[in-house]
């Protein structure tokens, strides 16, 4: 039998996979595209999946008995954005992403 923490970790993984899926659809078809049979734009669907993921992250904190606590870390986020900017610049220099020198 799994613990509540394990259950919520699985839900986080499921939601993260759904975020990845809609992010790829957004990249492929555009943020404002509305998939046939859907009422929402890809961007709106992405917002929903991100909120679902964050709900599960916060819920894990509630059920973990103090083992897990999440709060946004501005320094860690800034550090990640610096790393992403480095690799973006490299991709641009190779002519693979718009806005570079190539």
Image (cartoon, rainbow, N blue to C red):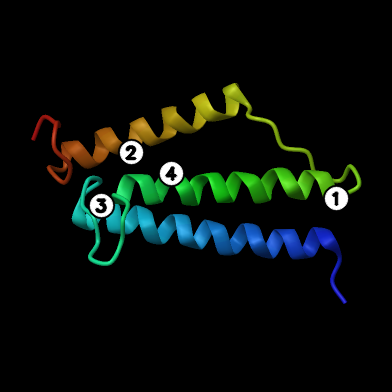
**Residue 77 in the image: x percent, y percent?**
53, 29
Q: Earlier in the sequence, mark 3 or mark 4?
A: 3
Question: How many numbered marks have been drawn onto this rendered protein structure?
Answer: 4
Q: Going by the image, does 8 lie left or right of 53?
A: right
Q: Earlier in the sequence, mark 2 or mark 3?
A: 3
Q: Alpha carbon of mark 1 to alpha carbon of mark 2: how far?
A: 35 Å
Q: Alpha carbon of mark 1 to alpha carbon of mark 3: how far?
A: 35 Å
Q: Of tags 3 and 4, which is closer to the observer?
A: 4
Task: Classify mark 3: residues with Cα within 10 Å, few (<14), some (14-19) or many (20+).
Answer: few
Q: Earlier in the sequence, mark 1 or mark 3?
A: 3
Q: Nearer the viewer, residue 45 or 71?
A: 45
Q: Earlier in the sequence, mark 1 or mark 2?
A: 1
Q: Of tags 4 and 2, which is closer to the observer?
A: 4
**Residue 90 in the image: x percent, y percent?**
26, 38
Disc 3 marks which residue?
Answer: 27
Task: Classify mark 2: residues with Cα within 10 Å, few (<14), some (14-19) or many (20+).
Answer: few
Q: Earlier in the sequence, mark 1 or mark 4?
A: 4
- Badge 4 element: helix
- Badge 1 element: loop
Q: Of tags 1 and 2, which is closer to the observer?
A: 1
For the point 16% across and 43% down, which residue is it?
94
The numbered disc on residue 47 is 4
The numbered disc on residue 95 is none
Q: Of tags 2 and 3, which is closer to the observer?
A: 3
**Residue 57 in the image: x percent, y percent?**
67, 47
Tell me if label 3 and label 4 are in contact, CB under 8 Å. no
- Badge 3 element: helix
Q: Alpha carbon of mark 3 to alpha carbon of mark 4: how far?
A: 14 Å
For the point 31% across and 56% down, which residue is it?
39
The numbered disc on residue 87 is 2
Tell me if label 1 and label 2 are in contact, CB under 8 Å. no
Q: Alpha carbon of mark 1 to alpha carbon of mark 4: how far?
A: 26 Å
């Amino acid at each position: 039998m799994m613990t509540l923490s394990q259950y919520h970790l699985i839900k986080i993984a499921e939601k993260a996979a759904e975020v990845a899926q809609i992010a790829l659809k957004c990249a492929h078809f555009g943020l404002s595209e509305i998939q046939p049979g859907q009422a929402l734009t890809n961007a709106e669907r992405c917002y929903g999946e991100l909120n679902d993921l964050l709900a599960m992250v916060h819920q894990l904190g509630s059920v973990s008995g103090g083992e897990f606590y999440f709060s946004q870390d501005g320094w860690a986020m800034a550090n990640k954005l610096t790393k992403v900017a480095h690799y973006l610049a490299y991709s641009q220099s190779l002519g693979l992403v718009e806005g570079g020198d190539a």
